[in-house]
Amino acid sequence: MKRPRPVRLATAVLVAIGLVLLALGLAGQHGDAAGRALAAPIAAALRSERRAVAPFAQWKESRVAVGARCLRLVLARTTDERRTGLIGRRDLGPYDGMLFVTPRDTTDPFTMFGTDLPLDLGLYAPSGLPLERDVLEPCAARSACPLTVPRKAYRLAIEAPRGSLPSGGLGGCGTG
């Protein structure tokens, strides 16, 4: 027995809509996965992390290129490490700054509450491309500390003493 024409048409439309939604969903998953992956030189630098030395003996460190300079950076990878950051630090010892690594793109803000050093903040995409820079001022009173809210989602952030953060994108330092 033949189906009436409107039922076949409705079925075909529903199948077509389902296929379009499936295709969009798969494309979105692929795009998200690509957006989450760090550029190969950055990922390699992070895999070569090692135990940090004083005054960050409980942390990890790595070397990451910023522009043409290779920086020795303390790594802040966990939520607790990122929350602690450079709070209470007056001296970074042999380190050029701190690299904040987030598991996904974020617009998490930065505060200088309890941070004693004036800092430069660089925000970077997973590809290592620079997104924005800010100047951060020390702040003693929590109620008076402004939040630095990024305008764009970032994956990587570097805090470095004022005037020391080079311009340019992130990459690997090469061998050595």
Image (cartoon, rainbow, N blue to C red):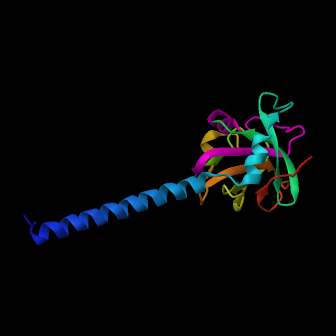
Q: Decide: is 127 above or below 158.
A: below
In this view of the protein, which residue sits in the foreground, 83 or 23? 23
Closer to us: 23 or 34: 23
Q: Nearer the viewer, residue 66 or 2?
A: 2
Residue placed at 71% from the left, 61% from the top?
A: 129
Label count reads 0
Q: Which residue is the extreme one toward the left?
A: 1
Residue 157: percent from left, percent from top: 70, 50
Give the position of the N terminus as an image quadrant: bottom left
What residue span does the magenta drawing correspond to?
79-106
Task: Please name the residue shown 59% across and 56% down the image.
Answer: 34
Q: Residue at x 82, y 28 (%)?
A: 57
Residue positioned most to the right: 176
The part of the image, by quadrant, that contains residue 12 is: bottom left
Residue 95 is situated, as x and y percent measured from the top left of the image, at 86, 41
Q: Residue at 84% of width from left, 56% of height from top?
A: 163
Whole-percent x and y of residue 28? Answer: 48, 58
The reply, left or right, for residue 25 in relation to residue 106 is left
For the question of whether residue 108 can be seen, the reply is no
Whether residue 42 can be seen here: yes
